[in-house]
Amino acid sequence: MKRIKGICNELAEKSDLYPTYKRLPLPKKVILPLGSFRREMAPLVKAGDKVIAGQRIGEDIEGVIPPVCASVSGKVLEVRPCLGFSGQEILSVVIESDGETNTKSVDENLQRELEDRDIIQLIFDAGIKETDQFYWPLPLRIAKPGLTSVIPSYQPFKTEPIDFLIINGMDRQPGVSVRRNALINREKDLLESIPVLQKVSNAGKIILTVYKDHPVPLDFEQKLKDLGVTILRCPSRYPIALEPLLVKFVTGRDIPLPMGNSRAVGTAVIDAITALRIVEAVKEGRISTETTVQVSAFSLGVNVHVTVAEGILLEELVEQLFPSLENLSKAVIGGSFLGYAQQNFKVPVTQEADVIVLQNADELSLYSNQPCINCGFCVRYCPMMLMPNELSKNCEYNRFDVAEKNDLFSCIECGICSYVCPARRPMVHLFRFGKQEILASKEES
Ligand code: SF4
Ligand code: SF4
């Protein structure tokens, strides 16, 4: 545990390099994945089409997942499978920006009084994507029973009343401060989101979770209390901000795993950034076309939060931020514990990414992994009480059926087992590989 505390403190200190904030100019080109490798969407545009920012360019045939919208205005160059930052090829729309800033809004007529059903529809149409992976899409997770039928494809989903609506103000891992900054800098917008969320969810209790060593300004806390929100200060202990552990800590309830749905235990979880996107969609009719991501380059002493059009290529983002950077060797999109290492910088940065860590050649630790020595550290520290040592061997030697039986899908990919492993086994990499193989074989059969 000392080692985990060690890295948490070290990363937390680095993140306190006072993140600055920048809005980047429109990118020359964006790549917008249509869904994920698990669920691709149908394109609504083709090469040569003109699009404006906010225009719907892809939608789920079954209408369950919110649509994908253009993040810039310009010309569609291609619709083809492109590599995403998680290493999967996903059907994507490639748009060349024309530099125009016209944006289509969700609903042109927001002056009227909004009914609950209008709000849910606006949230769906805004195409909000989330950093955390959830079992159900956002509008379905937060809609009170009965309201889900507004979206026709949600009709078959049976929803329970929401006892707890958790707004997660805690960043997912040490060293990241995107949610924390949003709480401090966008207090007014966050307060505006509360009545909206209360109206659509009819939640018994709304709880804002924060790390106990990240103080919330007293007047903000009072305003939240006036709106009926409880602030819960949680221990600064990774990975408490990840959904199953968060729900357990806040409500004492266990999400049924694998692939758990928190609504099954009367709980809805969203993060603070999503709450802000919801209020932008509902109050301003704004479609979610931008992303705010933390870029940390410790060798340069840089820790900056950038807001930029979604789908910007990693190489363009780096070029815009550090025009004279030379020996960049590696980027990790998604952070040190939860992220995906990139050697190819032509991948798009989407709303699912909250942090990008850049490393130069001197910072790389080069090692080769060794066979498991059965020390048991990974078993001791796994927060999901799994047997990571056995699971990793099963994935490594293609025994996917055994891995699945042993709860591979309950793994939240927190990376703690990799971190404590003295043999430096690439545990999370093996788990992701195993999950993809199992899902792919299920799709085929
Ligand atoms: S990544 Fe490792 S430690 Fe984390 S839940 Fe999965 S098996 Fe457990
Ligand atoms: S920590 Fe690494 S070496 Fe130790 S049991 Fe787990 S996989 Fe094996």
Image (cartoon, rainbow, N blue to C red):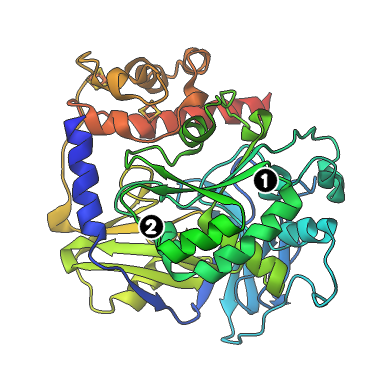
- In the rendering, at what x and y percent does residue 239 appear? 37, 37
Going 25% across and 52% down the picture, which residue do you hit?
12
Q: Position of residue 52 (x, y in %)?
A: 69, 78
Vertical order, 244 against 213 (above or below): above
- Report whether 65 appears left or right of 4: right
Q: Amino acid at mark 2?
A: Val
For the C terminus, which image quadrant? top right
Q: In this view of the protein, which residue sits in the foreground, 49 or 387?
A: 387
Q: Which mark is residue 137?
A: 1
Q: Is mark 2 within 8 Å of ligand 1?
A: no
Left or right of 356: which side holds 110? Answer: right
Crowd band around label 2 with a 10 angstrom C-alpha radius: few (<14), some (14–19), many (20+): many
Type of residue at label 1?
Pro
- Dividing the picture into quadrants, the one containing residue 356 is bottom left
Residue tagged 2: 355
Q: Secondary structure at mark 1?
A: loop
Q: Nearer the viewer, residue 129 or 397?
A: 129
Give the image location of residue 108, x and y in percent: 80, 77
User: Mark 2 falls on what kind of element?
Assistant: strand
Residue sitting nearer the eye, 134 or 59: 134
* Residue 215 image point, x, y percent: 35, 56
Say which residue appears at 24% left-offset and 15% top-offset: 376
> Could you say which is closer to the camera, residue 235 or residue 396?
235
